[in-house]
Amino acid sequence: GAVVSQHPSRVICKSGTSVKIECRSLDFQATTMFWYRQFPKKSLMLMATSNEGSKATYEQGVEKDKFLINHASLTLSTLTVTSAHPEDSSFYICSAISQGNTGELFFGEGSRLTVL
Amino acid sequence: GENVEQHPSTLSVQEGDSAVIKCTYSDSASNYFPWYKQELGKRPQLIIDIRSNVGEKKDQRIAVTLNKTAKHFSLHITETQPEDSAVYFCAARTGFQKLVFGTGTRLLVSP
């Protein structure tokens, strides 16, 4: 199957700093990528839908200015958590659908963010 | 938008027993229903999926059934093994739109 790589897998930062997480489709072109957030023992909550070359579509309640999403190419989407606070600590997972795919979603490994 | 409910939240079975997890969805236009297995700290792994033009699909010990009229679908695991212990998520999607996940079921298989 297709491979989605996410980096970094773990990051610890201080409050007030910004953190960038990268999501790459390694062997296919992804016109659409999704960013999810998962709290401990909870389900995956969709944060935003990222479309190559256009602005991301954010879910209700997700702050656009805090979670900056960029999808500059067909193989790369980035999530930047700006001015991070401890409540932003979470597991962030990206996923992608390939152009020719019939609908299966391929997930990255996830990034565990800890804000001190 | 789509809403997916999942039951039970926790399921404990003995090795060799069967396990059934049920999900209901709200959007009658949803046409793709995957099931994921997630181990602690790992990415969700697709274990089986079904599309709305099919009522049942089976892959070895895993099967999924879909009732479009009632808008519910179920995951069936037979001959459970300790390595089946994980959190399982159902999901539903309309076309190529976003995937909406259920709340998850923590399955524990005791030897």
Image: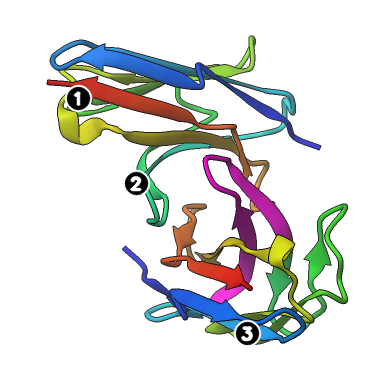
Read off the residue under disc 1: B61
Q: Secondary structure at mark 3?
A: strand
| Image position, residue A46 (x, y; %) | 68, 53
Chain for mark 3?
Answer: A
Residue B52 falls in which quadrant of the image? top right
In the image, residue A35 lies in the stretch drawn in magenta: yes
| Image position, residue A105 (x, y; %) | 49, 56
CA distance separating discs 3 and 1: 40 Å
Q: Is residue B61 left or right of residue A9?
A: left
User: Is A5 drawn above or below residue B2 in the view shown?
Assistant: below
Looking at the rendered structure, the kind of residue marked 1 is Arg
Read off the residue under disc 3: A20
Q: Nearer the viewer, residue A70 or A68?
A: A68
Q: Is residue A90 left or right of residue B40?
A: right
Residue A86 falls in which quadrant of the image? bottom right
Chain for mark 1?
Answer: B
Q: Residues within 10 Å of mark 3 (few under 14, many from 20)?
A: some
Instruction: State which tag comes first along the sequence, 1 or 2.
Output: 2
| Image position, residue A40 (x, y; %) | 54, 47
CA distance separating discs 3 and 2: 25 Å
Read off the residue under disc 2: B39
Residue lying at 42% horizontally and 50% vertically, measured from the top left:
B44
Image quadrant occupied by the C terminus of chain B:
top left
Residue stretch rendered in magenta on the structure: A30-48
Image quadrant occupied by the N terminus of chain B:
top right
Q: Are marks 3 and 2 on the same chain?
A: no
The tally of labels here is 3
Residue B105 visible in the picture:
yes
Looking at the rendered structure, the kind of residue marked 2 is Glu
